[in-house]
Image (cartoon, rainbow, N blue to C red):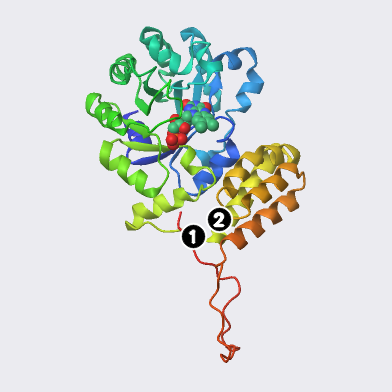
Amino acid sequence: MKEKIYSLTNNKIWLAPLAGITDSAFRTICKECGVDVVVSEMISADGLIYNRERSLKYADFTEFQRPFGIQLFGSDPDKMAKGTEIILEKKPDFIDINMGCPVKKVVNRGAGSALMKVPDIAQKIIFEVKKILKGTKTPLSVKIRSGWDKSNMNAIDFSKKMEDSGADMICIHPRTKSQMFSGKSDWSLIKELKESISIPIIGNGDINSTQDMIDMFEQTKCDSVMVGRGILGKPWMFQVFKEYFRTGKITSTDISTKLNLIKRHFELSIRNKGEKRAIIEMRTHFSYYTKGLKGGAKVRKLINKSLEKNEILNAIELLYLSSHTPKNPTPRTQYQKPNTKNPTPKTQYPTNPL
Ligand SMILES: Cc1cc2nc3c(=O)[nH]c(=O)nc-3n(C[C@H](O)[C@H](O)[C@H](O)COP(=O)(O)O)c2cc1C
């Protein structure tokens, strides 16, 4: 078990669970780009009990995605244990319990970050889930926030309780529930937590570039880092991370790599969900892929109306090609003869830093 936990957390890059976004297709793309560990979108323990087949679908994954964790949410220790028992049929590499979600629908049921207000119940959940995991060598992680609000920042005490109850890893997004996603995440809390408990810590929050990833490791000494929103529209960032680990250099991604990944993401989504549903669900991703590019708004409008796969692909391709072509290519001087023996290849686009 110790080895398994070490292999999940020693200097690793995790993809954050993002409901509605990190589905199987996107996780595969991120794995192909080099991310180490991926987690399912959050799955309701109640859903697993009362709507089993539908809920199990959210836990579908491919062997290629391993190591793969399944995240559960809920508030009742017995139901969380039952949900774990059901989800184990998928044979995940670890189970994660969501104790950080700030969304109303979740906290109103006493789940997600609401559990940070009731450490006794949270402990009972860990205790009951661990009982089910006993014998399967499946580690258990807990994903938390800093606390409920500014006056209740209990992440350190709470994590100690999680550790005492049997949690094997803690992932922390250091914002309070009240902050939702505003302000900056407080990385000093990740450092403090790392110094306070002995199980591995996965640091999360506001990693938007390779330099952020390096800084989080250096500043907090966390065991692994988890990236969420920063990867949206640029899954190739994981390739850049990997290249950095290999060479110590921060590289850039060329346009054909980007285009190939976008096309493959779309193809995978179609394979998993069928063309119509994929086109509709990929709109979120396409809006990230086109964000900040010149002409992006126009293309987004087209994509949001289109139900034609090729129309969407052509629009994306044209947008990428035009926005990565130099605006003012050096004009030929009037008397300069074209070099017909070695013409400049037409498709040479400058590489684009992240
Ligand atoms: C759209 C969206 C969906 C999310 N879904 C989940 C989820 O299902 N489970 C979870 O633990 N956190 C979820 N989160 C929180 C992220 O996993 C992560 O903790 C947070 O976004 C901070 O990391 P980042 O700054 O790298 O994005 C979600 C966040 C967003 C923006």
The image quarter in which residue 322 lies: bottom right
Residue found at the far left of this picture: 195
**Apparent side of residue 95 relative to residue 266 in the rendered image (left or right):** left
User: In this orientation, which residue lies closer to the viewer: 212 or 27?
Assistant: 212
- First in residue order: circle 1 vs circle 2: 2
Q: Which residue is mark 2?
A: 258
Q: Could you tell me residue 106's position as x and y percent?
A: 53, 17
Q: Which residue is mark 1?
A: 352
Q: Secondary structure at mark 1?
A: loop
**Apparent side of residue 215 relative to residue 115 in the rendered image (left or right):** left
Visible residue check, residue 39: yes
Marks 1 and 2 in Cβ contact (< 8 Å): yes
* Mark 1: amino acid: Asn
Q: Could you tell me residue 165's position as x and y percent?
A: 33, 14
Q: Is residue 151 above or below residue 192?
A: above
Q: Is mark 1 within 8 Å of ligand 1?
A: no
* Mark 2: amino acid: Lys
The image quarter in which residue 248 lies: bottom left
